[in-house]
Image (cartoon, rainbow, N blue to C red):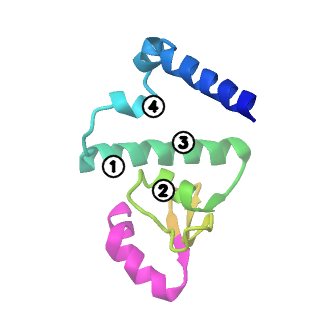
Amino acid sequence: MKAVSVFIFTIFIIILNTDRSSAQKTPLSSWKNMPQQIPSKTELTKERETKYQLVKAFLEKEGLTGILLTQVRNVYWITAGVTNTQIVLNKDVGAASLLFMKDGSKHVICNGSEADRLMDESLRELG
């Protein structure tokens, strides 16, 4: 048992004396270098329009009439982070789904109790 304790203590001392200056220079996350600012409504609108065009191009390329986004992360992505449909934290599917059609129309599919809340919180301004 004493030999194991000495071994663990030796490893601990080696780790403490290791030069970590190169590790400290590398940021753990790229977010540390990102500017911390809130995007303007104009920037969010431009981002959403770009994503709508990407979805429309995808639908045309694949010969589809529409696409139904049900997962929370997909709804969050297409709305540029404006709409969060998640109610239950351990579920991937939110309280509402968004249907995007090739003709550019957008539809919300949800139960009646969520429709008013979602429209009031964020979806009304998205068109």
Labels 2, 1: front one = 2
Q: Could you tell me which residue is drawn at 55 percent across and 68 percent down? A: 89
- As helix, strand or loop, the secondary structure at mark 1 comes to helix
Q: Which of marks 2 and 3 is nearer the N terminus?
A: 3
Name the residue carrying label 2. Answer: 76
Residue position for label 4: 29
For label 3, the SS is helix
Marks 4 and 3: in contact by CB < 8 Å? Answer: no
Asked if residue 79 is positioned above or below residue 42 in the image, the reply reads below
* Residue 115 falls inside the magenta stretch: yes
In contact (CB < 8 Å): disc 2 and disc 3: no
* Amino acid bearing label 1: Thr
Q: Distance between the residues labelled 2 and 3?
A: 15 Å
Which disc number belongs to residue 14?
Answer: none
Task: Name the side, left or right, on which 84 lies relative to 7.
Answer: left
Q: How far apart are marks 2 and 1 (CA)?
A: 14 Å
